[in-house]
Amino acid sequence: MLSRVAENIYWLARYLERAEDTARLINSMTNLLLDLPRNAEVEWYELIKVTGTEEQYLELFDDRADERSIMRFLISDQRNPSAIITCINMARENARVSRDLIPYEIWEQMNELFHYSTENAKASVNRRRRGDFMSGLIRRCQTMTGIILSTLPHDDAYRFLDMGYCLERADMSSRIIDVAVAKLLPEEEEINPAFATVRWISVLKSLNAFQAYRQQGFIGINGATVLDYLLHSGEFPRSIKHCLDAIGHCLRKIHKPQAARRQLDKLVTELEAIDTKKLKRSSLHRYIDDFQQDICLLHTAIYDTYFHSE
């Protein structure tokens, strides 16, 4: 297929996944308020760190770290290239230029998602409206995914779409683990175990993993077990291992995978070497830093091989 079409499909998936993951993250942090003691404070600036947008945020809002400014930046501020509204706009544009390839149902649902976000994003900065908007956005993104799975032929176009989804998902999962989890290893669990349990549950909910985690038969919530599940589960779709395995499956079906495959193999080898029972705060942070760099290199290998090949 043409490299420009492959690139459009790839970025369509990445932007959709980024919008959905950001909505999940905001929902989880907002709901965390209900589980914490009344006098406890939520560190809203964590969301800026997770999304990797500190530099852009500080340029626009200086050192303000209040809830409203952060929500505006993450949801409706089109100056932020990772804001939900920006991601939906970019996903729609990539869908528009790919209309000859994608089924009409996908384009129709993309428009519905676009109009929903455009009409409701600004009002959702308010906490009272936020939950309904995020839930509606997540449902519409999942509807898109379902339509794609059931209508798009599972050919090269689908594989580039799936790689975009999985690469973005792995990236966001690693960011959530790094920022929201690192401070809990292991000292906080010993000092304040009740608070640590609430935060670990919040991490699972950020990735929509809480119910799946419990259904696997795990007893109790502890850092090592949660981390092992989010890093190494082969069944849970948002675990890092599952995302890397899915990317590998796509690469095996597409021609010229050598450069991307070498980079992916490096990621898989390093992931398999992690023992979460022995993991300390510094080593987790160091691994996530390396993972982030390697994910960027994997993206570059895919980009150079398939999108600049003509």
Image (tube, rainbow, N blue to C red):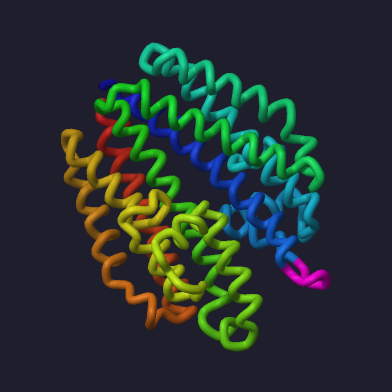
Q: Relative to 137, say whether 231 is above or below.
A: below
Horizontally, residue 101 falls left or right of residue 42, namely left
What is the total number of numbered labels drawn onto the structure image?
A: 0
- The quarter of the image holding the N terminus is top left
Bounds of the magenta span? 36-41
Query: Looking at the image, which residue is at 47% across and 24% down?
Result: 94
Question: Which residue is depicted at the point 53% across and 21% down?
Answer: 109
Camera-nearest residue between 112 and 13: 112
Vertical order, 107 against 171 (above or below): above
Q: Which residue is drawn at 43% across and 66% down?
A: 288
Quarter location, residue 196: bottom right
Q: In which quarter of the image is the C terminus?
A: top left
Residue at 20% x, 53% y: name it. Answer: 262
Give above or below for 126 relative to 272. Answer: above
Residue 211 position within the rendered picture, expressed as x and y whole percent measured from the top left? 50, 56
Q: Residue furthest bottom?
A: 191
Image coordinates for residue 2, horizontal then vertical, percent: 28, 21
Q: Can residue 55 be seen in the rendering of this structure? A: no
